Image: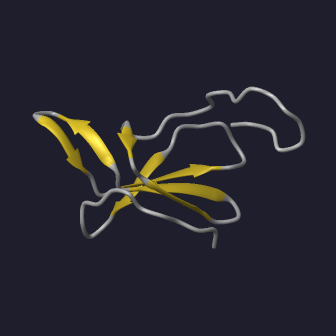
Amino acid sequence: KWSFAADGTATDVGELTQVRAYAGGTSSRSSGYTAGGYSQVPGGATYVNTIDKFPFTSDTNASDVGDMSLTKGYLAGQQV
């Protein structure tokens, strides 16, 4: 997390449900979401279909709220 009002260093305030790269990000007015990506899993690395949600109002870990219909990475997102 970082402030838009002033320059400064970001702070770690929560964790996704799994470490991954190349995930897509999107948001509603109250929550942020990450979907898909490339993750290290037992047996090697693979694309995943995980959808994580994290609230903007509190500094908590993300929760797994669903799965995409396909495993994908290199995604793009937008604000709703």
Q: Up-down: is 22 above or below 3?
A: below
Report whether 57 appears left or right of 23: right
Q: Residue at x 40, y 40 (%)?
A: 17
Q: Residue at x 62, y 57 (%)?
A: 31
| Residue 15 x/y as whole percent | 50, 34
- Report the number of numbered marks: 0
For this orientation, the residue located farthest to the bottom is 80
| Residue 76 x/y as whole percent | 48, 64
For this orientation, the residue located farthest to the left is 43
Q: Up-down: is 75 above or below 21?
A: below
Quadrant occupied by the C terminus: bottom right
Quadrant in the picture for residue 74: bottom left
Q: Residue at x 83, y 44 (%)?
A: 4
Report whether 35 appears left or right of 62: left
Report whether 42 appears left or right of 22: left
Quadrant occupied by the N terminus: top right
| Residue 19 x/y as whole percent | 37, 36
Quadrant in the picture for residue 51: bottom left
Q: Residue at x 33, y 56 (%)?
A: 73
Task: Give the colour scheme shown.
Answer: secondary structure
